[in-house]
Image (spheres, rainbow, N blue to C red):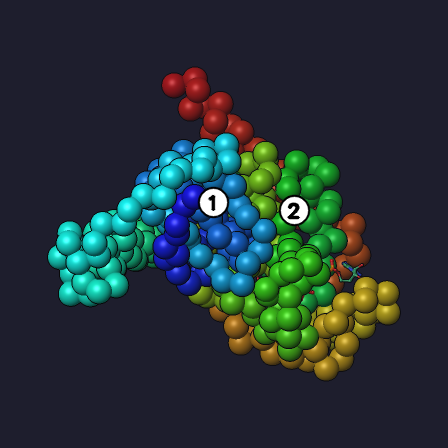
Amino acid sequence: MLSSTSCLLKNTAVANIAAPLNSKIAATFSSALLNNTKVSIRQFSLTPLHLEENKVEPPKNESTVEIPIKEAETTSEPPKEEPPKEEPPKTQSCSCNAKETCNSKNCCCKKAVLMLALAGIAGTAYYYYENRDQQTFGDDTTVVYVLGGPGAGKGTQCANLVKDFGFVHLSAGDLLREERQRKGSQYGELINNYIKEGKIVPANITIALLENAMAKSPSKRFLIDGFPRKMDQAKKFEKTVCKGKFVLFFDCPESVMLERLLKRGKTSGRVDDNIESIKKRFVTFKETSYPVVEYFEKQNKVKRVSCVNSPQKVYDETKAIFNELFKAEENAKKNATKN
Ligand SMILES: Nc1ncnc2c1ncn2[C@@H]1O[C@H](COP(=O)(O)OP(=O)(O)O)[C@@H](O)[C@H]1O
Ligand SMILES: O=c1ccn([C@@H]2O[C@H](COP(=O)(O)OP(=O)(O)O)[C@@H](O)[C@H]2O)c(=O)[nH]1
């Protein structure tokens, strides 16, 4: 049997330890965050191998990194009956103050010191994660952010791009809705409230969902639709997950978006495709999300496409941008291999 000391970390810390390692570890830890599970580290060492070997357990009430203290060897055989040993007198070999209740084998002082050490290690890992400058996905991964107001037509155009350019489409809104529906999700209610109110779900949750989906995908090309919609998301994702290549921004007047959303609302079943939520979403878009577009515009990373025309016309323009960019990329690769 193992007796365990649980080193409780905040949910965010659990996911956050993942990224400096590799995408598989990122998947393990972001799943742990979302599943609210314990990640057991049987032999405590923060190496990818050890982390990978440990299976994620079913949801529990708290997100913990459980660091067991090994007291005896674990075997698959049932414990053998041993003749009862005579306990040494409690006061004989323990140097701590609680001589009446403590013996040397299970000394409360030793346990306290060990717990402190483990908490220190976990805290240090969290600190280094928070302050790291390394992304989980490197230059071989292409991320295109697809932004635009609610109902501008982001999802519609992404579907076309997937067919023609072999991108994997990750809609942040869809991932959040899936997570909201997932049985046992600790974030279901929170996500639902944010979506209904047209507010932006806390960055850690959305980033964990995206990072998890990227890590699980064999693709190296991602259209990230409807994200980042807030500056904290943009900065954190760029710093810790992957740098975006550019932003495809679908420009659409509010009146057109309103008409499209009300029409979509007749069949979408979405809790936010109603006039009250739509008004709130427009405010969030103007005040919170558009500054993200301006931020990337300052870095010359925004490609703007007007979205008022028919879906086909909008796609013609979008396709031309992708053809240009990815043709240039192909040529650059060819030149690099020649030299
Ligand atoms: N160019 C367009 N013209 C008219 N309707 C459109 C156009 N693009 C998308 N739509 C419709 O508008 C609604 C919103 O489009 P969608 O792609 O879901 O937007 P978003 O992903 O930006 O919220 C959908 O019902 C879609 O069919
Ligand atoms: O990074 C994101 C993306 C979406 N959302 C939430 O999901 C809702 C729906 O977003 P989606 O992109 O699916 O739809 P859109 O508003 O673009 O039609 C938003 O209003 C937000 O409440 C969020 O919180 N963070």
Q: Residues within 10 Å of mark 2 (few under 14, many from 20)?
A: some
Residue drawn at (47%, 45%) of the image: 26
How far apart are the two marked residues, 1 and 2, measured between alpha carbons? Answer: 19 Å
Classify mark 1: helix, strand or loop. helix
Asked if residue 122 lies left or right of residue 244, the reply is left
| Furthest residue toward right | 266
Residue drawn at (15%, 52%) of the image: 93
Q: Which dot, 1 or 2, sits closer to the camera?
A: 1
- Residue 169's disc number: 2
The front one of 8 and 69 is: 69
Residue 98 x/y as whole percent: 20, 65
The front one of 297 and 45 is: 45
- Residue 274's disc number: none
| Furthest residue toward top | 338
Q: Amino acid at mark 1?
A: Ala
Asked if residue 180 lies left or right of residue 103, the reply is right
Residue drawn at (58%, 51%) of the image: 58
The front one of 90 and 43 is: 90
Q: Residues within 10 Å of mark 1 (few under 14, many from 20)?
A: many
On screen, 278 above or below 68?
below
| Furthest residue toward left | 95
Q: Which residue is mark 1?
A: 26
Classify mark 2: helix, strand or loop. strand
Residue 25 x/y as whole percent: 46, 41
